[in-house]
Image (cartoon, rainbow, N blue to C red):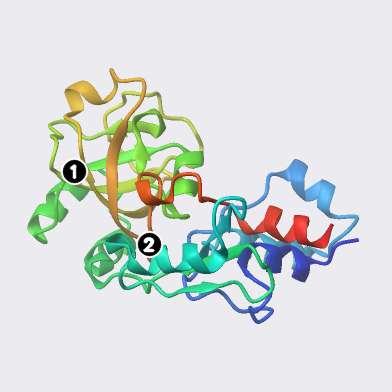
């Protein structure tokens, strides 16, 4: 049986203290479904299942990049990453255990997010929140994304149009937006933003497409993330100098392949 500690370490890193959160901090834990809890009960206690729920809802503390050793060495790729303009300010190091992996550490949460976090803590879920944002000098617009997109955002991704479920009326290219995740998956694509309901705030970004065209496109970048709740990670999607030299991989398969 795999211990609860091992499962969490495979996500956040073997160096984490058991019972502590990563530097990114927890992000709105979402409970396992009853079916999943029943599957876990033969292996874990209720307390361990609760810990798993909390820890698996915490963003990873680093972005892990696996090096294509057929194309370059880890040291060569590390030099490229350290020199790239987009990655300035990030701590980038060779993984201490995995010989073909580089870790890009998550930055501390941006102070620019503080007023958004304060506003969300007030629990203003009705359309009144648009007025409250304006009153506080914050951009009024918002977008809602699906859960898969939300999880990708917490790992450093930008938002593609297929992941957007709803957007506030009047949204235009160049507008900054609050980004929420539709946790329940109930929103119909193309919806207008009304009540927040069970949506979770994950960060702020810049919309790249007018709302009138946003839901007509089948592909393309819709919102470039600026700051993410829990701290920023870089998007490496369009860093051309890295093409073919590496790929981003989450820690679970990295640790699994090493163990095997």
- Relative image position of residue 75 (x, y in whole percent): 52, 69
For this rendering, which residue is in front, 36 or 156? 156
- Answer yes or no: is residue 249 visible: yes
Nearer the observer: mark 1 or 2; the answer is 2
Q: Earlier in the sequence, mark 1 or mark 2?
A: 1
Residue drawn at (27%, 63%) of the image: 85
In the rendered view, tell whether residue 167 sits above or below residue 41.
Answer: above
Q: Which mark is residue 34?
A: none
Residue drawn at (51%, 40%) of the image: 148
Q: For the view shown, which residue lies furthest in the top direction?
A: 216
Query: Which residue in the protein does label 1 denote?
Result: 141
SS of the residue at dot 2?
loop
SS of the residue at dot 1?
loop
Which image quarter: residue 58? bottom right
- Answer yes or no: is residue 230 visible: no
- Tag 2: Cα neighbours inside 10 Å, few (<14), some, or many (≥20)? many
Q: Is residue 158 left or right of residue 31?
A: left
In the rendered view, tell whether residue 57 sits above or below residue 15.
Answer: above
The quadrant in which the C terminus is found is bottom right
Query: Which residue in the protein does label 2 denote?
Result: 229
Q: What is the C-alpha distance between the residues marked 1 and 2?
A: 17 Å
- Relative image position of residue 251 (x, y in whole percent): 64, 59
Q: For the view shown, which residue lies furthest in the bottom direction?
A: 17
- Relative image position of residue 15 (x, y in whole percent): 65, 79
The quadrant in which the N terminus is found is bottom right
For this rendering, which residue is in front, 204 or 118? 204
- Relative image position of residue 119 (x, y in whole percent): 25, 61
Residue drawn at (61%, 55%) of the image: 69
- Tag 1: Cα neighbours inside 10 Å, few (<14), some, or many (≥20)? many
Residue drawn at (15%, 47%) of the image: 140
């Amino acid at each position: 049986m795999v211990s609860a500690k091992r499962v969490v370490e495979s996500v956040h890193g073997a160096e984490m203290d058991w019972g502590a959160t990563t530097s990114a901090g927890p992000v709105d834990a979402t409970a396992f479904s009853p079916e999943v809890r029943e599957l876990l009960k033969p292996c874990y206690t209720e307390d361990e299942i609760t810990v798993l729920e909390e820890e698996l809802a915490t963003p990873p503390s680093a972005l892990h990049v696996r090096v294509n050793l057929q194309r370059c060495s880890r040291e060569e790729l590390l030099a490229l990453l350290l020199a790239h303009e987009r990655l300035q300010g990030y701590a980038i190091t060779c993984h201490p255990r995995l010989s073909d992996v580089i870790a890009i550490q998550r930055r501390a949460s941006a102070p620019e997010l503080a007023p958004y976090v304060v506003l969300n803590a007030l629990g203003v879920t009705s359309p009144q929140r648009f007025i409250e944002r304006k009153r506080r000098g914050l951009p009024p617009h918002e977008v809602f994304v699906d859960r898969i997109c939300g999880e990708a955002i917490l790992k450093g991704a930008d938002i593609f149009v297929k992941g957007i479920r709803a957007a506030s009326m009047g949204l235009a290219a160049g507008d900054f937006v609050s980004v929420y995740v539709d946790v329940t998956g109930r929103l119909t694509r193309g919806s207008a933003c009304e009540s927040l309901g069970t949506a979770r705030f994950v960060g702020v970004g810049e919309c790249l497409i007018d709302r009138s065209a946003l839901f007509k496109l089948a592909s393309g970048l819709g919102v470039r993330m600026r700051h993410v709740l829990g701290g920023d990670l870089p998007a490496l999607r369009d860093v051309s100098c890295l093409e073919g030299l590496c790929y981003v991989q989450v820690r679970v398969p990295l640790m699994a392949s090493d163990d095997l």
